[in-house]
Amino acid sequence: KYAYTSLGMSFLMGAFAQEWCCLLLQWIPLYHCSALKERFKNVGCPYGNNPEITRFENVQRTVACQCMDVNSMIELNISDFIKGQYGVVAVLISYGALLGKVNPLQMLVIVVCNVAAYVGNKFLCVDYRGGVDNTGSLYTTHIFGAAFGLG
């Protein structure tokens, strides 16, 4: 009757979220980098600070010169897995609000959507706009996980 226990489902969803989050944390910056390279291809590298444009524009041009192309291979190391664990925390916070209300297939769909939204939120808040989240768990994990689980 109780084939899928909450502990077993937590492990399964956590493992899937870990893998998905590690891949998305690599793919989204690579695609952003290729868009920046296309946008600033006429500027040239190396790029110095230009006082006539905004600081954000200067940072974007510098990133375009230093980042890898989308066609390059993805390299996963231990720090990528640690960053992926923050995405798992956001999933499990949401999972706690939904425990007992959804079946495993619905939870799998929620995990895919939750991780994609978490990585997008992290990219926009921290990587793109330059927000500071030193612990990696303040607004990108706990607040997002709680809001996604209740919403």
Image (cartoon, rainbow, N blue to C red):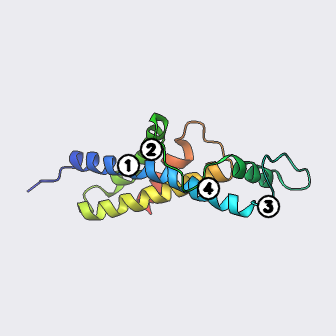
Q: What amino acid is at disc 2?
A: Gly
Task: Tell me which residue sits at (18%, 50%) in the image.
Answer: 5
Check disc 4 and report the residue beneath it: 124
| Residue 89 point in image, percent of width and height | 41, 45
Horizontal side of residue 46 vs 98, given as left or right: right
Separation of marks 4 and 3 at Cα, in angstroms: 25 Å
> Closer to the observer: label 1 or label 3?
3
Check disc 2 and report the residue beneath it: 84
Secondary structure beneath dot 2 equals: helix
> Closer to the observer: label 3 or label 2?
3
Separation of marks 4 and 1 at Cα, in angstroms: 21 Å
Taking the view exactly as shown, the residue that stands out farthest to the left is 1
Check disc 3 and report the residue beneath it: 42
* 122 vs 147, nearest the viewer: 122
Residue contact at pointers 1 and 3, CB within 8 angstroms: no
Residue contact at pointers 1 and 2, CB within 8 angstroms: yes
Q: Earlier in the sequence, mark 4 or mark 2?
A: 2
129 relative to 83, above or below: below
Q: How many marks?
A: 4
